[in-house]
Image (cartoon, coloured by chain):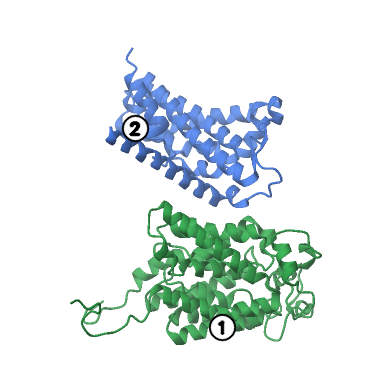
Amino acid sequence: MRFSTAPSPHLAPPNSVSLIMLQVLAALVPGIIALAWQFGPGVLINILIALITAEMAEAGVLRLRQRPVLSALRDYSAVLTAVLLAVSLPPLAPWWLTAFGTSFAIVIAKQLYGGLGYNPFNPAMVGYAVLLISFPRYMTAWLSPIDLTSAVPGFADTLALIFQQGSSQSFDGLAQATPLDTFKTQLGLARNVDEIQSAGIFGALAGQGWQWVNVWYLVGGLWMLHRGVIAWQIPAGFLGGLFLIALLFFMFDPATHPTPLFHLLGGATMLGAFFIATDPVTASITPRGRLIYGSFIGLLVFIIRSWGGYPDGVAFAVLLMNLAAPTLDHYTRPRVYGHSR
Amino acid sequence: MNLEPYRKIAFDGLWKNNQALVALLGLCPLLAVSNSVVNSLGLGLATTVALLFSNSIVSLIRNRVSHEVRLPVFVLVIAANVTVIELLMNAFFHDLHKILGIFIPLIVTNCAIIGRAEAFASRNTVGKSLADGFFTGTGFTLALVALGALREIIGTGTLFAKADLMFGDVAKNWSIEVFHDYGGFLLAILPPGAFIGLGLIIAVKNVLDERAAQAVKVL
């Protein structure tokens, strides 16, 4: 008679790929709810479109590569990529935009490099960068948050706009620049921070609407830290680096630089710090390497936001540091106990 | 006349040792200007002409140039050729010359040309070197045009746009609109599109080679 259990000690593996992915997905839920509350149900439809596309693309490529399909679909990594990309897209992004970005992320950025574990770049951010570069008009038009307007489109309207059917409201009438975008344009017009802030798109902490989304991402991220799903070094490095450099410039010249808090709770900062930069495949894996990796992302985000051509820079910063991760790992290898360096 | 070596030269230049797809030489101009068929064709033909001249001249002087100074001599020969080609293009295809800009003079530094001069022309007769220049250049041009067509169709939804820059007023309406009401896909026109497109073309070539090799094995 054979027993299916191995000899003792009977320790269940604490984490498998699918369990980690599920926990990350669960941690995203508060942020997604905040997004849907502030910007209407568009984000939910985007997630649905992205999920369907991602699973189809993953299954298709795996079949072509003659790899087992079902086990790869069950590890939820494609699901996570799809959700991360979908929450970064504007709520009224046309359906083909979401579908194209997701399939690019899965097919080119993930599977062509060899699938889960082999991709040098974060697939969701590759998809985002491709969309941002290719279709800037759609990618920079967000809705006004509900804190500012009563006219957040309902479910039917959102559906009609996403699938580009006739709707009572037009895309251009609803779309609005994000606070980061406004900030950059207005600074370009030689306004100072006080004048821009009197325009009313900034709330108590940071950009109206955006502040709550970021706070809820932060809550989800802290829960992941508590569960040990992600290491603390990357978010700490990211947020610390961003905070320090933003504080430095804010103290030096508060007339043309927003407060550090605006940077921390604006744009995709929290999403990036806890959910995107911490991707175990593409991030640095040594403790010191992670700290350096995170803080350079924070630094790059500030640089791109302040002087770059695009309003937010999390995607580009993460992709750039993905490139540097193997080098960081090489030079920050921890000392093996009992060996000298 | 024995044609066998020429057949090998043709196959090497066009396919087996294609400078763009196998040797990966001359990628700088290849990636930079291949955003439309006409630009690709213009640069490809200029490179082919440069290859023809440089290969034949290098082959002619191959026994008079000592081994130690051969590279500077080759570079001088190529630079002189390219200067002539650039001036001619400026005179007869002025608008195309303006678009291709710096990449015409930069043909001097195209590794494919000095590579052929060093690897082939300096060791072979003038006839063979001319054939090698022609087929290598054609292979380079074909790869360039394939990439240009790919990027132009995906990027702007047209084919042969602005063909009049090269073929004169006859070609004013050669432009084919592949997709109607196409919004455009900027990525394909921008530099990343060149890298991704070239990668995909190389992948297709490798798959074809692999299939051919397997077919031979089965036989």
Q: Quadrant of the C terminus of chain A?
A: bottom left
Q: Secondary structure at mark 1?
A: helix
Q: Residue B173 vs residue A123: left or right?
A: right
What is the chain letter for disc 1? A
Chain B as rendered: colour? blue
Q: Is residue A138 visible?
A: yes
Q: Residue furthest top?
A: B1
Mark 1 lies on residue: A218
Most foreground residue, A162 or A39: A162
Which residue type carries mark 2?
Ala
The image's mark for residue B119 is: 2
Q: Nearer the viewer, mark 2 or mark 1?
A: 1
Chain A as rendered: colour? green
Q: Secondary structure at mark 2?
A: helix
Q: Residue at x 70, y 78 (%)?
A: A38
**Mark 2: few, some, or many residues within 10 Å (few <14, many ≥20)?**
few
**Mark 1: few, some, or many residues within 10 Å (few <14, many ≥20)?**
many
Q: Residue B2 vs residue A101: left or right?
A: left
Residue B189 percent location from the top left of the image: 60, 47
Which residue type carries mark 1?
Leu
Q: Quadrant of the N terminus of chain A?
A: bottom left
